[in-house]
Image (cartoon, rainbow, N blue to C red):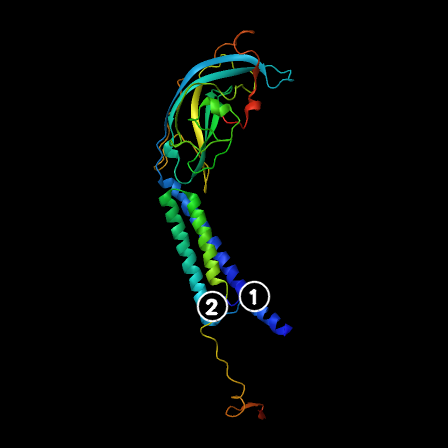
């Protein structure tokens, strides 16, 4: 019981995502932060106030972190399918130095 | 990007890259904003008196007390990246040996805050009345007039100037000049120049005709014992 809870917490903190999710996370990071930077500069220039640039830049970065860092379900849509342990038993035979391995 | 910590590090790392790129853009955007400063600076009155640097000093020096009129339009120095402008008036006169640059001494300065600067007691608001400037009340919100346009008549100097030698009376061929630093939010500190730089025009006017410091005033006349500028340092004009 206690082990299960510890395992849950560990998983949540580690926040592992699948390979497709990693590709998506990286793409989101670059796309969002670049857009936020561009908007920050343009909005600050239009309103003639550098504070606006700073606030938009920081706020947009916080939002990006919120979207990219936690292991959201959409990062785990393509879990890796491992071969089941039973398959190895019958059709595939592995031999090492002429000896058959089970 | 497999774990949350790695993603956090990656996002933060790319954020620093984006932030520095934006900062560089902002810094360079200053150079695209035209500057057309103009000023008219006139000498009102000069007096030279004997004084000492501070109360307990036994050293006697000559101090020049220079009053001036200033009428400026420096509003084009305030672009979106201007934090504040440090404005000063310097008196320059020929050095003792011709190989050296002209001697310069600052007699008045002020910090002009940009439009989005929060109020601070070090800022100088040319449109505030003298009375409210002297009162100890907290600074009010900046006036709505564009910063950098103001007029001073018969303005007293903030610092009474002297020469390293202690003698300044009868010094010939002196002029007053207006100069400034533009302090940006992001980017390099820029100084007033003698030449145009891109869309930044040099200051139009802002220089008095050459004048000669008068002879020393006799004791018991005029200003009494002059006080060196140390006491004024860091205070608004």
Label 2 marks a residue whose chain is A
Kindly state the secondary structure of the residue where label 2 is placed. helix
Kindly state the secondary structure of the residue where label 1 is placed. helix
Compared to residue A82, the image places residue B218 above or below, namely: above
- Can residue B221 be seen in the rendering of this structure? yes
Compared to residue B11, the image places residue B197 above or below, namely: above
Front in this rendered view, residue A4 or B113 = A4
Label 1 marks a residue whose chain is A
Front in this rendered view, residue B112 or B142 = B142
Q: Which residue is mark 2?
A: A22
Horizontal and vertical percent for residue A38?
39, 52
> CA gap, disc 2 to disc 1?
16 Å
Q: Which residue is mark 1?
A: A13
Horizontal and vertical percent for residue A65?
48, 59
Residue at left offset 44%, top offset 21%: B176
Residue at left offset 42%, top offset 64%: A27
Instruction: Estimate how packed mark 1 is, as few (under 14), some (14 to 19) or many (20 or more) residues with alpha carbons within 10 Å.
Output: some
């Amino acid at each position: 019981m206690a082990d299960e809870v510890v395992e849950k917490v560990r998983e949540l903190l580690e926040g592992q995502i699948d390979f497709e999710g990693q590709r998506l996370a990286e793409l989101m990071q670059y796309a969002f932060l670049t857009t936020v930077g561009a908007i920050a500069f343009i909005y600050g220039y239009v309103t003639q106030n550098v504070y606006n640039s700073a606030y938009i830049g920081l706020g947009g970065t916080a939002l990006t972190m919120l979207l990219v860092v936690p292991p959201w379900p959409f990062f785990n849509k393509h879990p890796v399918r491992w071969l089941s342990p039973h398959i190895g038993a019958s059709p595939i035979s592995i031999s090492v130095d002429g000896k058959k391995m089970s | 990007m497999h774990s949350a910590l790695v993603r956090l590090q990656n996002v933060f790392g790319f954020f620093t890259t984006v932030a520095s790129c934006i900062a560089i853009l902002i810094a360079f955007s200053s150079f695209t904003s035209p500057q057309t400063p103009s000023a008219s600076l006139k000498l009102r009155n000069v007096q030279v008196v004997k004084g000492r640097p501070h109360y307990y000093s036994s050293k006697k020096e000559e101090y020049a007390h220079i009053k001036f009129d200033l009428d400026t339009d420096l509003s084009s120095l305030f672009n979106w990246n201007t934090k504040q402008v440090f404005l000063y008036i310097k008196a320059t006169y020929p050095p003792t040996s011709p190989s050296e640059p002209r001697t310069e001494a600052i007699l008045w300065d002020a910090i002009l805050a940009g439009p989005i600067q929060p109020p601070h007691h070090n800022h100088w608001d040319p449109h505030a009345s003298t009375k409210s400037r002297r009162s100890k009340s907290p600074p009010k919100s900046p006036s709505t007039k564009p910063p950098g346009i103001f007029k001073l008549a018969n303005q007293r100097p903030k610092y009474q100037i002297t020469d390293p030698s202690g003698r300044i009376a009868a010094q010939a061929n002196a002029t007053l000049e207006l100069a400034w630093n533009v302090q940006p939010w992001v980017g390099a500190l820029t100084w007033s120049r003698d030449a145009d730089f891109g869309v930044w025009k040099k200051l139009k006017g802002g220089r008095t005709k050459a004048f000669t410091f008068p002879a020393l005033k006799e004791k018991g006349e005029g200003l009494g014992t002059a006080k060196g500028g140390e006491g004024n340092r860091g205070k608004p004009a």
